[in-house]
Amino acid sequence: MPTSARNVLGTLLQTCSLDPVTGFYRDGCCNTGAEDLGLHLVCIEATAEFLEFSRAVGNDLSTPIPEYHFPGLQPGDRWCLCVQRWKQALEAGMAPRVHLEATHISALEFVDLEQLQDYAIV
C-alpha cells in the first residue's frame, strides 16, 4: 500500500515487512493514525534476546495468536514496534536493531534520531 508518510530521515516511509505482515493497519508499513494508541512506529528486526525481553515485560511477541492473524515473531523478522516499547528496551540495554527508512517520523517525538541511528541496520 503506497503511503505519503515520512520516515525519520525525512524521505518516504518504506515497507517494514509483508512476511509477516506488520503495521497497526496490517499494511506492511509503520503507518499511524488516531486509532493507533500504541504508536507502532519503529521498524525493528527481532532478535531472540529482544523477544525474550519483550515477553518478560508483558508483551509476548513470539506466541502465535491465530484469531488475530498473528503468526508470532521469530528472530530476523521485521515488525512495527510500539515506540515506547523500543524506548523501554533501549533503557534496559535490549533494544533491537532498527530500519530507519521504515520507521515513522513520529517516533522522533519520543526518541532522538541519534538513538535510532545507533541501532540502525545499514
Image (spheres, helix red, strand yellow):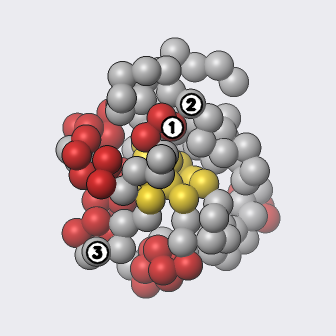
Quadrant (top left, top right, bottom left, bottom right) of the N terminus: top right
Query: Is residue 81 in view from this perspective?
Result: no
34, 18: nearer the viewer: 18
* Number of numbered discs visible in the structure rendering: 3
Residue at image location 28% in from the left, 74% down from the top:
93
Callout 1 touching callout 2 (CB < 8 Å): yes
Identify the residue position indicated by label 1 in the image.
102
Real-space Cα distance between discs 2 and 3?
27 Å
Q: In this rendering, would 106 be left or right of 23?
A: left
Q: Position of residue 62 (x, y in %)?
A: 63, 74
Within-10-Å neighbours for mark 1: few <14, some 14–19, many 20+: many
Instruction: Work out whether 101 lies above or below 72.
Output: above
- Residue 14's tag is 2
- Residue 77's tag is none
Indicate which disc, 2 or 3, sits on the residue closer to the N terminus.
2
Q: In this rendering, would 76 be left or right of 55?
A: right
Query: Is residue 45 in view from this perspective?
Result: yes
Instruction: Work out whether 106 lies above or below 82.
Output: above
Identify the residue position indicated by label 3 in the image.
93
